Amino acid sequence: MDSTRTLPRRFPLWQKLIVLLLALLAALVIAILFFPWDVLREPVNRYVSEKTGRKFEITRRLDVDLGWRRATVKFDGIEFANPSWARDPYLVKAERAEFDIRLWPLVSRRIEIPRLVLASPTVGLQMEADGRRTWAFGKDTSDAGTAPTIGTIEVDGGAIDFLAKHLGVDIHADVSYDTARGALPVHYRIKGRYKGQPLTAQGRTGNVMQINAAGAPPFPLEIDAAAGQTKLKAGGTVGSLADLDGIDAKFDIRGQTLGALFPLLGIALPQTSPYAVRGNLSKRGSLWEAKALQGKLGLSDIAGDMRFDQATQVPYLAGELRSKVMDMDDLGPLIGLPPTARTAATVEGVAPPPTVTQVKRPGGKVLPTAPLDFERLRAMNADVKYMAERIRNVRDVPLDSGSVQVKLKDGVLTLDPLLLGVAGGKLGGAIRIDGSKNPADIRAALDVRAMQLARLFPKLETTGNSLGRLDGRINLSGSGSTVANWLGGASGDVAVLAGRGQFGNLLPVFATLVGGDILKFLLRGDRDVELRCAAVAFDVNKGLATGRTLMVDTTNALFTATGQANFATEGLDFVVHQEPKSKSLLSIRTPLVVSGSFGDPKGGLQVGPLAGRGLAALALGAVNPLLALAATIETGPGEDSDCKAVLAQANKPTAGAAANGAARAKGAKQQP
């Protein structure tokens, strides 16, 4: 035997094991690649149905493409039923469905679907007040952990229904796909109800909708919607539909009143005239921002920037708004008055509010009775500044400009500082409404500084007469749910004071009914009468304003008055006494009576003194007609008042309810 012949080489055991393992792995890969996945269709149908408690069926074919990190699952026909309590029979029913699913999260029982493609789907989504949702998998459909995380969705048409009765939402959307539409191939139409109001909408989107796709480019979206009388047009991009994040869009919104946005968006804005506002809208996380706002509220222009932050438990609204010209009629809805005919039809495409034709209230009452909305006061916090460079259509009140800072915190609304330019002077102060109480605790502290009397009476100003300066204050506090019932129960102090000035003598001549002065006026023309001082001051006790000092002193006559104004009944009851300061012939001087209501005041002569003079003239005339003139001779008993003492008295409320109410009202300026 040849000892040099070589023996067969033997491989080590570990090498044999590696070869065997590779062979098995190759066989497994081949088996997976060529595995007839459709044989698992029925087992999968049974398994999903059992685990979710509702029928699941792949109607025609199942196929799977496996990868290391994810699998692509393809269904040829799918029907997935809704829970028995849902209105629509299917959560999803589609001709075809394809989705990617991440494999490793399945270990921790999390379902992550980065991509979902549906062909001609019908989708039935529903939420209940107790937390149940049709898209939550598992038998407990209120368990948020059983809902899948979906990245992007691609559709080529279909229909979607969404019902949430407790939110006032019931909408149906039809979706169609057409590649000829370019970058926005998906067209949708929506109809139904949103927050209890009829809703219609239509628009276009890209064919890949990002439900929750981190890092993916935002998808384009256009919408033209109407909810009730509120209309919205917007176009831009959205990063994530799941939480409406990454929004960048231009918008145009219009409607009958900004107050109607509260049930729709949860933003507690005041009642306004019809509006149309456009601007740029963005959302990052919990912060919404509306910048470069431009538009109008009724006949007033509006511009500025606003922010709405939902990060805290109570949302927070902040911003700065301004108007070049603010029309006085547009302030009416803020205190419960309907828009006037001038402002009601100013916005194209928005029907005038139905309250334009106001039914006249009985008894000539005019104080606003619209109730304060306490729910809105508690719905958010706010800090908004507003300034009007010019105010027009002020009729008998010569307002020049205005600004206010509106703060709302924990149901307490403050207007502080509130500043209005009036008649060349200023009306400034604060108003505080504590809406955390019902009825609300309302306090108003306003000061009048350097108003020009000539500006307050334009007819006198046009004659070239120069009137003096007017100062005063309003300090009222009380409880109420409307402007009317607040004033009807308020206590405090109201005072208006004026110093020296001049005005034509026609008004005081006729007010004193001095015939001789009338003859002199007719013969000699107008002449100046000096105003020495004037004071109109009221003590207000539970809505009853009693004259503390009611006096006007001129070189021609002294006027004093007594009486009351009742804010609860809106009734007037005053007697004005005139005391001419010079002798005159043909005087029929008698006290004047002011009665009626705020909305329908009535004036007249007090009958008793006038009748006495008339009877005296009649009796003397029977003896000798010339003696009848003796009964009309005015001996001029009027004397100059002590202006310093009168103004001092008028400037201090009477101790008691009036003083206490005024002190509480002044506290409005000290609140945060």
Image: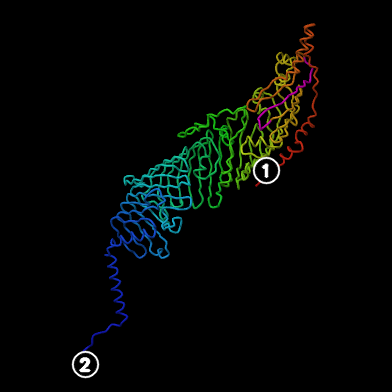
Horizontal relation, residue 38 to residue 605: left or right: left
Frontmost residue, 88 versus 575: 88
Res 360 → quadrant: top right
Q: Nearer the viewer, residue 295 or 131?
A: 131
Instruction: Provide residue 323's location: percent of width, then percent of height.
Output: 56, 37
Dot 1: element: helix
Q: Which label was assigned to residue 3? A: 2
Residue 235 rendering spot, x and y as whole percentages: 42, 44
Specify few, some or many for label 1: CA neighbours under 10 Å numbering under 14, 14-19, or 20 or more: some
Residue under label 1, please give it.
669
Q: How many marks?
A: 2
Q: Which residue lies most toward the left here?
A: 1
- Residue type, numbered disc 2: Ser
Q: Quadrant of residue 231?
A: top left
* Quarter containing the N terminus: bottom left
In the image, the segment drawn in magenta is 566-584
Residue 210 percent coordinates (x, y): 40, 52
What amino acid is labelled 1 in the image? Lys
Q: Is residue 389 magenta?
A: no
Asked if residue 71 is positioned above or below residue 478 in the image, the reply reads: below
Q: Nearer the viewer, residue 480 or 259?
A: 480
Q: Who is closer to the viewer here, 42 or 76? A: 42
Whether tag 2 and tag 1 are in contact, CB under 8 A, the answer is: no
Q: CA distance from mark 2 to mark 1?
A: 118 Å
Is residue 582 in the magenta section? yes
Horizontal arrangement in the rendering, residue 353 relative to residue 33 (left or right): right
